[in-house]
Image (cartoon, grey):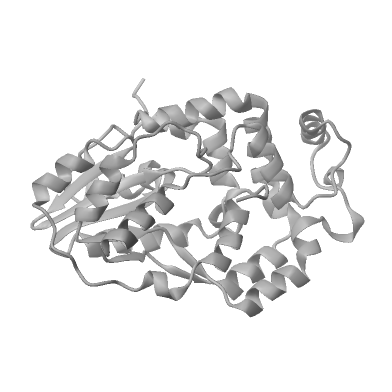
């Protein structure tokens, strides 16, 4: 992306680039043995978990947003595992029509500016407003909180030149004609309606978290990326930038976290009912949060093999 954007804004703009054609499964290729694929996947420089149920193997790759294209990260093992898997699952995908995009352009001021000539000082507490102004070096902001949160997260190390895990996997699946599909599809008109009609007050937890990430600075953001690469899950989730990325995601701001969890739980159950190897790229926070996907699988009597995702016990 060449524009500044938060996780939420990335979700909005992604609807322009994604089409229903990408969601269609392709002809199933011949794959290597299950054990070979699993061994390959274990070499991935990212958090992964292997879950088995009978003849089904699910490889969960925990992804985070805002990773820089310049980050040193070996992707060859992940690409190899994807190319040899039976199927690949991507995060929820937005689909937009030209009419949807036209609405965004027509209402661009709503997306980029606060309503009724108001400023950030009309919504934020005096303390939070002062913290934001110290970071930006400016007075009260007229920017929408969607855009302001993007600026704050960039101060905290959230990269504009992003390197999404899902993009790497999508290219590998397409090149090898591995069947691939999103776990769900989000209509562009619904997504855009939500963004255009959500009041600034809904973004207050996001602005608070993004301010804390900016105060922690880019060094903290870089450490988050390194912890992710080295599979230090609790450290990643405790990172101010990761907490901001979660709080500022479309699903959090719009109050649709339970919907996302339901989509992923259904997708995981379906994958574990199908024979063969499924590679799934899922949000790390959704996998590793308390009572998240990994906890639910454990409660169901399965054993996710991979890095410890639970916080250390006192």
x, y percentage for residue 15? Answer: 55, 66
Please say whether residue 305 is visible from this viewpoint.
Answer: yes
Q: Residue at x 67, y 26 (%)?
A: 215
Q: Residue at x 57, y 43 (%)?
A: 161
Q: Is residue 182 left or right of residue 203?
A: left
- Res 158 → quadrant: top right
Please say whether residue 265 is visible from this viewpoint.
Answer: no
- Res 106 → quadrant: bottom right
Along the line of sight, the residue nearer the viewer: 202 or 163: 163
313 is higher (above) or lower (below) than 109: above
Quadrant of the frame with the C terminus? top left
x, y percentage for residue 116? Answer: 89, 60
295 is higher (above) or lower (below) than 174: above
312 is higher (above) or lower (below) than 70: above
User: Which residue occupies the extreme front position in the image?
Assistant: 175
Q: Residue at x 67, y 44 (%)?
A: 150
């Amino acid at each position: 992306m060449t524009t500044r954007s938060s996780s939420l804004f990335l979700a909005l703009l992604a609807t322009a680039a994604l089409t229903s054609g990408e969601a269609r499964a392709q002809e199933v290729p011949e794959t290597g043995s299950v054990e070979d694929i699993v061994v390959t996947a274990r070499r991935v420089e990212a958090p992964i978990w292997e879950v088995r149920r009978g003849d089904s193997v699910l490889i969960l790759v925990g992804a985070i947003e805002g990773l820089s294209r310049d980050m040193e990260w070996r992707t060859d093992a992940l690409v190899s595992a994807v190319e040899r898997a039976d199927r690949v699952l991507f995060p929820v995908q937005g689909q937009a029509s030209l009419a949807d995009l036209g609405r965004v352009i027509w209402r661009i001021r709503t997306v980029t500016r606060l309503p009724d000539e108001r400023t950030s000082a009309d919504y934020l507490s005096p303390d939070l407003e002062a913290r934001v102004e110290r970071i930006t070096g400016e007075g009260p902001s007229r920017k929408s909180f969607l855009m302001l949160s993007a600026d704050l997260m960039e101060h905290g190390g959230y990269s504009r030149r992003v390197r999404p895990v899902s993009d790497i996997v999508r290219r590998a699946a397409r090149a090898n004609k591995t069947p691939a599909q999103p776990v769900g599809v989000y209509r562009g008109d619904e997504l855009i309606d939500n963004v255009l009609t959500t009041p600034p007050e809904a973004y207050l937890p996001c602005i608070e978290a993004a301010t804390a990430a900016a105060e922690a600075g880019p060094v903290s953001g870089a450490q988050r990326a390194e912890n992710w690469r080295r599979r230090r899950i609790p450290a990643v989730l405790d990172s101010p930038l990761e907490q901001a990325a979660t709080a500022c995601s479309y699903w959090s701001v719009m109050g649709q976290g339970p919907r996302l969890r339901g989509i992923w739980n259904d997708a995981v159950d379906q994958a574990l009912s199908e024979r063969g190897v499924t590679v799934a790229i899922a949000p790390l926070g959704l996998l590793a949060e308390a009572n998240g996907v990994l906890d639910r699988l454990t409660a169901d009597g399965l054993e996710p093999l991979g890095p410890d995702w639970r916080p250390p016990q006192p």
